[in-house]
Amino acid sequence: MKTFTQLIDDILPSIKEVYPWDLEEMLKEDSNLLLIDTREQDEFDFAHIQNSLLAPRGILESCCDWNYAETIPKLVQARQLPVVIICRSGNRSALAAYTMQLMGYEDIYSLKTGIKGWNDSDLALYDKTGERVDPDLAEDFFNPPVSEQQLEP
């Protein structure tokens, strides 16, 4: 049996990661760069990187392939394009990048430190209405408390 952290550690050598400041530069240099946010709808609605597409981790594989209700044509057609996967902290995105490599994506990256790191780097986030999100509110949202029942005994 492996823990979530062990699963991530096992795949990290197999994927490429970029830091928020690297992604900022990539966005300036490459208009074909596709941003895929693998968080849940409520997380995405609260705050996301501008122009990113939502493909929640739970349905990612069907978003990446034809003939599903979740199919995202732009994503399916991006197998040879640079794609950066985003999540809250960089763990779900690492798993997603690994999976997408298995599905034939050739130039895939995971955002190391996730959207939390993006926010910590004072880079802009936007809500579902297109309004800029206050970084302090985002900080609180991205760091929910862990209850006593959720801690390992």
Image (spheres, rainbow, N blue to C red):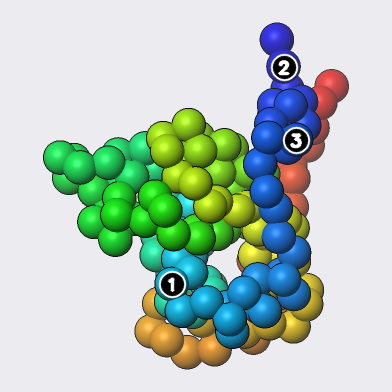
Q: CA distance from mark 3 to mark 1?
A: 26 Å
Residue named by callout 3: 13
Q: Residue at x 39, y 42 (%)?
A: 60
Residue 118: x and y in percent read: 70, 71
Q: Residues within 10 Å of mark 2 (few under 14, many from 20)?
A: few
Q: Is residue 50 above or below residue 22?
A: below
Q: CA distance from mark 1 to mark 2?
A: 37 Å
Residue 131: x and y in percent read: 47, 89
* Secondary structure of residue under mark 2: loop
Three-letter residue code for mark 1: Asn
Q: Along the line of sight, which residue is nearer the eye, 122 or 107?
A: 107
Q: CA distance from mark 3 to mark 2?
A: 17 Å
Q: Residue at x 29, y 61 (%)?
A: 74
Left/right placement of residue 22 relative to residue 75 reads right
Residue named by callout 1: 32
Q: Residue at x 39, y 65 (%)?
A: 53
Q: Is residue 2 above or below residue 18?
A: above
Q: Along the line of sight, which residue is nearer the eye, 19 or 142?
A: 19
Residue named by callout 2: 2
* Secondary structure of residue under mark 1: loop
Q: Quadrant location of the C terminus?
A: top right
Query: Which numbered disc, 3 or 2, marks the residue that appears first in the sequence?
Result: 2
Q: Residues within 10 Å of mark 3 (few under 14, many from 20)?
A: few
Residue 75: x and y in percent read: 34, 55
Q: Is residue 8 visible?
A: no
- Whether tag 3 and tag 1 are in contact, CB under 8 A, the answer is no
